[in-house]
Image (spheres, rainbow, N blue to C red):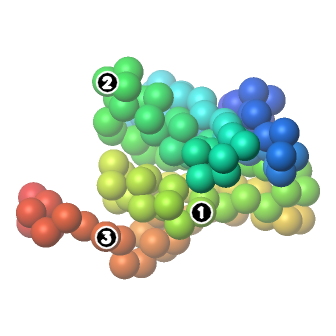
Amino acid sequence: MADAEKARAQAYAPYSKFKVGAALLTRGGRIVHGCNVENASFGLSICAERNAVWKAVSEGERDFVAVAVTAGRAGGASPCGACRQVLHEFAPGLVVYWRDGEGRIVERTIGDLLREPFVWPRRRGK
């Protein structure tokens, strides 16, 4: 969770004031940070989790084992639906950690969080 807090410190959230950080762990042991970045045109904003995935993929990483997400000790922030879908795309067995509204750390698999992910028909059988 400490790396997610480091990432959260870089968040750009002037509109919502809801800063989120994510730390994505690769199978090789690398940690990739991401933070939410808002925009005045709200649809152009990006969540911390997707920011971390885009950064990792752009740097050649594709094999992820875990992600930690935080909005601070009292800010509950499990991944949103869009982030769950993106995380599942790259790592269907991913372990997800986040702080609930009481500050406790919660652990679930991405499969627990996204029971029926969208899967492109050609990828179903890989």
Residue identified by numbered label 2: 60
Question: Please, is residue 114 above or below residue 86 in the view?
Answer: below
Residue drawn 79% across the image and 61% down it:
76
Left or right of 18: which side holds 59? left
Residue 74 pos. (x, y %): 90, 56
Please tell me which residue lies in front, 119 or 39. Answer: 39
Q: Amino acid at mark 3?
A: Phe
In the rendering, at what x and y percent does residue 48 appear?
62, 42
Label 2: element kind? loop
Instruction: Tell me the amino acid under the disc marked 1.
Output: Cys
Circle 2 packing at 10 Å, graded few (<14), some (14-19), many (20+), is few
- The answer to which image quadrant residue 19 occupies is top right
Separation of marks 1 and 3 at Cα, in angstroms: 15 Å
Q: Residues within 10 Å of mark 1 (few under 14, many from 20)?
A: few
Q: Nearer the viewer, mark 2 or mark 3?
A: 3
Instruction: Give the residue furthest to the bottom.
Output: 116
Question: Does residue 105 sit above or below 38 in this rendering?
Answer: below
Q: Give whichever of 80, 41 is nearer the camera.
A: 41
User: SS class of the residue under badge 3?
Assistant: loop
Q: How many residues crowd mark 3 within 10 Å: few (<14), some (14–19), many (20+)?
A: few
Residue 63, image quadrant:
top left
Q: Position of residue 108 (x, y in %)?
A: 56, 65
Gap in angstroms between the C-alphas marked 2 and 3:
24 Å
Q: Which residue is mark 1?
A: 80
Q: Which residue is mark 3?
A: 118
Q: Residue sitting at 54 percent across and 38 percent down?
A: 51
User: What is the CA distance from the residue labelled 2 to the residue labelled 1?
Assistant: 24 Å
